[in-house]
Amino acid sequence: METGQFQVYTGDGKGKTTAALGLALRACGAGLRVYIGQFIKKGEYSEIKALRALPGVTVEQYGSGKGLLVRREPDDEDRACARAGLDRITAALTGGDYDVVIADEINCALTCGLLAAEDLTALIDRRPENVELVFTGRGAAQAVLDRADLVTEMRPIRHYYQDKGLPAREGIEM
C-alpha cells in the first residue's frame, strides 16, 4: 500500500469492532497483510475462529481472561496484559510485516486505566506512511481524534439488549 491512513471507530453504539473486522476482511481479499490486536478481550469468539482461517491475517488477544472490566476494577495482571499488548502492536505496526494494523478496544484500554493517552499518541506517531492503522473502542481521547484521518462515531438509537433484555448471541455479538 502506498499511503496508509489512521482511522478511529468510537462511540457508545454497537459495531466498532464489526466495522474494523469488515475492513480486515476487505484488506485480506485484496491481498494485504493484516494484524489484529485485541485489548481487554480473551476468548475463542466466532470472529476469532473465522479470522484465524484467513490467509495473511494474524490475531492476538491481550486480555487477562478474568471477565469484562465494566463489572470489576482492573488489576496488575490486566495492566501487564495491556502493556504487553502495546509492545506487540507497536512491533506489528513498525516491523514492516503488515499493511493494516487494528488495535481493537485500545480506546477502552485507555478509559479503563490500562494505558495512558501518551501510549496511544506515541503509537499513532510511530505509524509508517504505508500502513493503515485502526483504533476501536468507546471513549476515544481527544488527542487520538485530533490525529485521525477518519473518525466514525457509532451512536445507539435502539438495541435489543436494552429494549428486550436479549443477551449476546453466538454468531451475532460473539
Image (cartoon, rainbow, N blue to C red):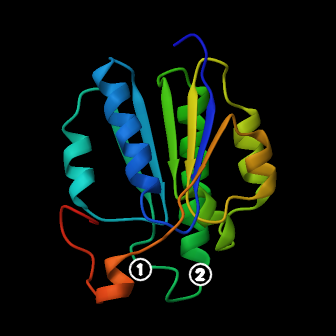
Disc 1: which residue: 66
Residue type at numbered disc 2: Asp
Q: Residue 75 carries which label?
A: 2
At 25% from the left edge and 61% from the top edge, which residue is drawn? 45
> Residue 166: percent from the left, percent from the top?
26, 84
Is disc 1 placed on a helix, strand or loop? loop
Is 14 drawn above or below residue 58 in the view shown? below
Q: How far apart are marks 2 and 1 (CA)?
A: 10 Å
Tell me the quadrant of the picture where the C terminus can be found. bottom left
Is disc 2 placed on a helix, strand or loop? loop
Q: Do the residues labelled 2 and 1 touch (CB within 8 Å)?
A: yes
Quarter-of-image position of residue 33 = top left
> Residue 38: percent from the left, percent from the top?
45, 54
Residue type at numbered disc 1: Lys
The local crowd at label 1, few if under 14, some if 14 to 19, many if 20 or more residues have their Cα within 10 Å, is some
> Residue 71: percent from the left, percent from the top?
49, 89
At 23% from the left edge and 63% from the top edge, which residue is drawn? 172
Is 25 drawn above or below residue 43 in the view shown? above
Does residue 170 appear to the left or right of 66 in the view shown? left
